[in-house]
Amino acid sequence: MNQQAFNYGSYLQLDKILDAQHPRSKPEEHDEHLFIVIHQVYELWFKQLIHELDHLHELLNEGFTDRAGAVLNRMLKIMKTVVAQIDVLETMTPLDFLSFRSFLEDASGFQSLQFREMEFALGYKRRSTLDALEGTPRWESLKKRYDGPSLWDAFLKLLEGSGYQVGPRPDVTQPVTADPAVQEVLLDMYRNNVKLRRVAENLVDLDEGLQEWRYRHVKMVERTIGRKPGTGGSQGVAYLQSTLNPFFPDLWEIRSRF
């Protein structure tokens, strides 16, 4: 028996990817296919962002600031692509979405384990989120992110390794919050260490990109369903608005002190 030739399709596993869109509406509503594809693409980009975050964490731990900056720049470009996808999703009107919304039943974006992993890896950790998703696929990976140091913790370690007096956070399972003592160190670093300042500004760029995506996501949901509850019983827009906060608050707090 001849072995099937290795080619473009087999390398990319296109048979699996292109057979992964299964609308549930009966008869099938045209826009449900777009809705599925967009969210599948989101999950692929989340997977890549997590891949880059893990590499970035390693680079910061090893003190490779130039290479870390390149990875952060790549992540920012990915975030811009993710934001641009909202423009495509917004071509779907509220009535288009309503035509198949009931078929989603309890499925909700809140259940995106990869996005929660990304949040935890960045330092936005909540025990309630971890508990709510227990028993779902990838939960063990999410728990590992919750228990481990975040990207911000890796940056603090980089500062400490560069001679700055900043200790580790006492509990890495807690969300990253503003710390006046850290801000004093950052002000000194900004004025006297160009390499570390570049990394810090790259982190601000990434944070801004993440906030932009969240804001656009909020407005897209509000445009589509208004103030109605989200799928799966979530609070919809009200919940999404509560997440519009920076991941690295200290880097924003120091802006008014230069």
Image (cartoon, grey):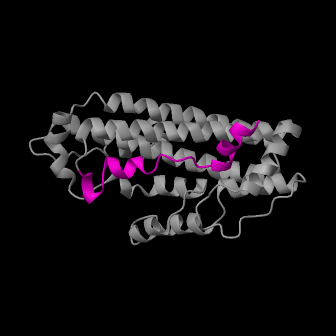
Residue name at image x 86 percent, y 55 percent: 161
Q: Which residues are magenta?
A: 229-258
Residue 223 image offset from top left, x and y in percent: 28, 35
- Residue drawn at 79 percent across, 38 percent down: 197
Magenta stretch contains residue 246: yes
Q: Residue at x 19, y 46 (%)?
A: 101
Left or right of 184? Residue 6 is left
| Residue 254 percent coordinates (x, y) | 71, 43
Is residue 14 visible from the viewing direction of this image? Answer: no
Q: Nearer the viewer, residue 128 or 70?
A: 128
| Residue 52 seen from this side | yes
* Viewer-closest of 178 and 124: 178
Is 143 left, or right, of 88 in this rendering? Answer: right
Identify the residue at horizontal 58%, vertical 32% (top origin). 77
Image coordinates for residue 83, horizontal then vertical, percent: 46, 33
Point out residue 224 in the picture as x, y percentages from the top left corner: 25, 37
Residue 213 in the magenta stretch? The answer is: no
